[in-house]
Amino acid sequence: MSDDKKSPTYNHTEIHHNIEASPKAPGIKAAFRFNHASSPWVRGISSGLSSSLPILIGILFDHLQYGLIASIGGFTYLYTKDEPYAQRAVKLFLALLGVTLCFTLGSLFADVAWIKTILFGVIGAVSVYIFGALKIPGPSAMFFVLSFAVSTSIPAPNLQSVFLHAGLVFLGGALSWFISMSGWLINPRGPETAAVAKAYRQLASFVGSLGTESFHAEQHKTVVELRAAETAMKQAKINRKKSSFAHRLFLLNQKAEGLFIFVMAAANDFNPAVSKKAQAVIETFASEMATLKKHKKIRDVREEIEELSIKEELRTLLLDVNDVLQMKELKETEYIQFSQGSVKTRLKAAFHKRSYVLKNALRYGIIMIIAAAVAYTTNIPRSYWIPLTCAGVMLGATVRATVQRGIQRSVGTILGILIGTGILMLEPTGIVIALIVFVLQSTIEIVIVKNYALGTLFITPNALLIAESGHPDKAISYFTSARVIDIVIGSVIGVVGTVLVFKRASSLRLPYLLGDVIRKEGQFLEMLSTEQDEERIKQERNKLQGELVNLRALYDNVIGEYSKTAVKLEGLWPAVVATQQLGYMLLASYEGYELSETEKRELKETFAQLAAAAEQKRAPKLSSVPTLKHYPIIQGEIVALYESLQVEI
C-alpha cells in the first residue's frame, strides 16, 4: 500500500461506536419464564379440530380405532404458519405426504428393530436438513418422527392393513389441509398483507432506533422482515397486472425497501426528534395495513407528513406510501429485493462440508439412531417414546436451548402423566375422547407460545390418549411407569448427545464465516465498479444479504453454547456488527462505484487482511485503510470494521 495514506482517523458517524452490548443467552431459569406472546386462538381451535374431527368421524362410523389413526394425519396442521395460501397449499400437501410416508414406513418395519432404528435417524436428519436449508419455521422433524414412532405400535397384520392405515392418515391430513386453507375464503390475501404490515412495523422500530444502542439489532430484524415480506409476495403467486389489490401490496413492499435504503444511507443526519416523528407515521401505516382489504382506504396522513422537518427524499417516500394506501396510481421504482432464492438453490447451497445445516442434520440423525438403539434394547413397553422424546428435546436452536428443552420436556411430561392418568381413570369412550383431544390439542397451541414446559403438560396426555386408547387394559399402568422412564432416558440422550457432539460447533465456525463474509463484501464492492450485468449483481446482492443474516444467526448460536471458546468469541461482537453495517450499506448501493485500479488493488489487499484477521482472531496487519474520496460513507464503514477487529482472542 502507498505511504501517503494516513492512519484510519476517518470521522464516521457515532452510530458505529454506539453498539449495544452483546446479546446474552438465557439461563436455566428461562425454561420456566413466560413469554408475552399473544395467544393464537384461531390456530389453537383449528389445530384441535384437525385432531378431533377424524376421531369423531370414526366414532360416527363405529370405527374408533380408524378415527384415532386418522387423527395422526391431523398433526399436518401444525406445519401451518403465516405463509400465503398458494405456498401453504403446497407446503402442507408435502407435509401431508411426509407424515403419511413416515407412518407407512413405521407400519412396514414395525417388527424389524434394526431397520426402525436406522429410519428414526434418516427421517430426523432429512427433515432437519430440509427445514434448516429452507429456513422453514415450525416443528421441523417432530411430527414426522411422531407418525413413524406411533405407527410401529399399531398392529397391521398384513400389507392390506398397512395401506389401509396409511390411507386413513392421509385422509386425516387432507382434512387438516382444508381446515388450514379455509381462511382463504374469508381473506385470500391475508398472510401476505400481514407480512408487509409486519415489515412496516419493524421498519418503524428501526427508524426510532437511530442514534441508540439498539440500532444494529433493529437493523438486522428489519432486513429479516423485509426478506419475509418479499418472500411472501413471491410465494403468493399473484398477478399484480390483473389484480389492483395485489399491485397495491407490491408497491407497499417496494416502498418499504426504499425507506430502508434511504434511512441506511442518511442515518448520520437523523436526530432523535425527527426519528420519533417519522416512526409514528410509519407505525400508522403499519396499523392501517394490518386490516387492509380490497377497495378500502385508510386515514390520509398527508398533512402530518408535510409538517415533518425531514429531508425531501424521505418526505417523498412517505407520501408515496400514503398515496398507495389511498389507492392512487404511482410509478414503480427499482429497489433492492431481499429474496431468499429458489428452493433448489437453497437446498444445494446448504449441502457442503462446512455447512452448519448439514452438520446439524447429521448430528440430529446420529443421536436419534442412538436413542432408538437404546429403546429397542430395553423391555420397556412402547419404548419408541424414548427417541420421540429425544427428537423434541434436540429441536432447541442452541446447546443451551436443548438443555432447557430437556428440563421443560421432563417436568412438563411428568406433570402431564398425572393429567393423563386422571383422564384414563375416567375411562372415556366415544365422543368424549374426541372432545378431550380437541380441548387438549387446542390448549397446547394456545399455551405453548407462552412456555414450552406448559405446552408439554398437555402434549403427553393428548399424544398417548390417541396412541393408547385402543389398549384400555394397559394404558393406566403405562402412564404411571414406562412413560416416566422413557422421558428421562430420551431427554438425557438428547441433552448429553447435543452437549458432547455439538458443544463448540458454532464457536468453531464463527471466525471463518466472519472472514468469509468480509471477503465477499470486498468482492461485491469491486464487482459494483466493474459488472454491467444487472441480473448477476442482483444474484450476488441476494447471496451477500443471506450471508449477513446467517452471520448474526450463527453468533446467536455461539452465545448459546457451553464452552470457554464461546465466551472468548463474544469479543468478536463489535466486528459482527461492523461487518453487517458495511454489508447493508453495500446492499443499499445502486450507483456503480468508479474505482481506480490503485483503489481496487488496495481495497482487495485491505479486505484480504481484514478477513484473515477475523479468521485468525487477531488484529489486522494494516497500517491504514484506503481513502475513497468519492465514497466517504463506505470508507467510514471500512474504518469502523478495521477498528472493531483490534482485538486478540
Image (tube, helix red, strand yellow):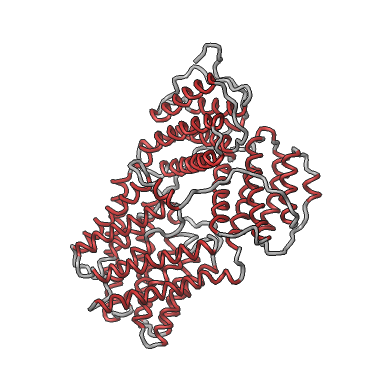
Residue 387 at x, y = what percent?
A: 29, 61
Is 78 located above or below residue 277 in the figure?
below
Judge from the rendering whether residue 579 lies leftward or rightward of residue 203; answer left or right. Answer: left
Instruction: Compare residues 413 and 291 and report the one nearer the observer.
Output: 291
Q: Residue at x 46, y 62 (%)?
A: 91
Q: Nearer the viewer, residue 197 or 412?
A: 197
Q: In which quadrant is the C terminus drawn?
A: top left
| Residue occupying image coordinates x 55% and y 37% | 533
Describe residue 185's horizontal placement relative to residue 460 as left or right: right
Q: Residue 464 or 545: which is nearer the viewer?
A: 545
277 with respect to 560 (left or right): right
Q: Is residue 93 left or right of residue 477?
A: right
Return the x and y of residue 250 as percentages of the image width and height: 64, 54
Relative height, residue 645 to residue 440 (above, below):
above
Q: Position of residue 428 (x, y in %)?
A: 38, 83
* Residue 433, image quadrant: bottom left
Please name whichever residue, 101 or 414, is drawn nearer the observer in this view of the structure.
101
List the single residue furthest toward the top.
3
Q: Is residue 419 visible?
A: no
